[in-house]
């Protein structure tokens, strides 16, 4: 059993260890879930804002999706950079850490959630005031979360992704 509280696992303990005990595997999975939830928060803010703005402005679906993706990256990186900047890391270094830590995760998340929204009939044409718009967004973000956790788990196990961020805490 791991006596450390959730969110304080030391990723370097798991780096390239095929013989890891089950409790260490659980810690690694927990770390991936935490990293994915963190990434999802930033991406969701950007996605919701982008889809809402694009829909409100009556933009085409491709233009709306591009805006949502750009904002998802901006907010996703921003969620990682904020605590790094507060800890005293220079902005250029914080940006480098955020780019290295989050790019793969955000790309997977964006591909999955946008593909899901596009596959739900009528979702992109639904108005902001419809249940279909919001339900499809919730489903898409849930699919993105589930699909991104294993990606983050692999990255963290290799000392990449959010493992890099935790080296600066």
Image (tube, helix red, strand yellow):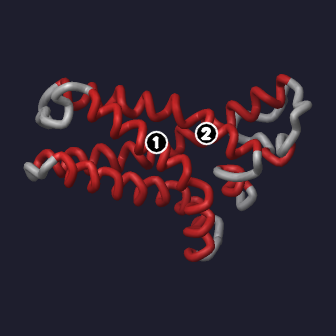
Viewport quadrant of the N terminus: top right
Measure how far apart labels 1 and 2 are at the Cα level.
10 Å
Of residues 117 and 22, which is closer to you in this image?
A: 117
Which residue is at a point 83% across and 48% down the rendered structure image?
Answer: 12
Q: Where residue 132 sits in the image (x, y, percent)?
A: 19, 25
Say left or right for 41 vs 54.
right
Q: Is residue 84 above or below residue 39?
A: below
- Marks 1 and 2, the one that precedes in the sequence: 1
Residue 83 vs residue 114, the one in the foreground: 114
Give above or below for 163 relative to 138: below
Q: Position of residue 29 (x, y in %)?
A: 69, 31
Percent across and percent down for residue 167 are: 75, 58
Quadrant assignment for the C terminus? bottom right
- In screen coordinates, is 98 left or right of 49? right
Q: Which circle marks residue 24 in the picture? A: none
Disc 2 packing (10 Å; few <14; some 14–19; many ≥20): some
Q: Which residue is mark 2?
A: 151
Residue ID at (70%, 56%): 164
Q: Is residue 5 above or below residue 108?
A: above
Query: Considering the numbered disc 1 on the image, is that residue within a helix, a strand or a loop?
Result: helix
Residue 109's tag is 1
Against 96, residue 65 (above or below) is: above
Q: In the image, 110: left or right of 120? A: right
Determine whether label 1 and label 2 are within 8 Å by CB: no
């Amino acid at each position: 059993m791991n006596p450390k509280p959730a969110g304080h696992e030391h990723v370097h303990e798991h780096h390239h260890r095929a013989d890891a005990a089950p409790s260490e595997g659980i810690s690694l999975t927990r770390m991936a879930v935490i990293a994915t939830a963190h990434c999802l928060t930033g991406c969701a803010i950007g996605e919701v804002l982008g889809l809402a703005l694009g829909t409100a402005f009556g933009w085409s679906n491709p233009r709306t999706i591009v805006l949502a993706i750009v904002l998802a990256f901006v907010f996703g990186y921003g969620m990682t950079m904020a605590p790094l900047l507060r800890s005293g890391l220079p902005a250029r270094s914080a940006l480098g850490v955020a780019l290295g830590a989050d790019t793969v995760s955000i790309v997977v998340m964006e591909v999955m959630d946008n593909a899901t929204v596009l596959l739900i009939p009528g979702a992109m044409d639904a108005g902001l005031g419809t249940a279909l718009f919001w339900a499809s967004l919730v489903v898409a973000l849930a699919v993105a979360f589930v699909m991104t956790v294993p990606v983050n788990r692999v990255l963290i196990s290799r000392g990449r992704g959010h493992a890099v961020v935790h080296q600066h805490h």
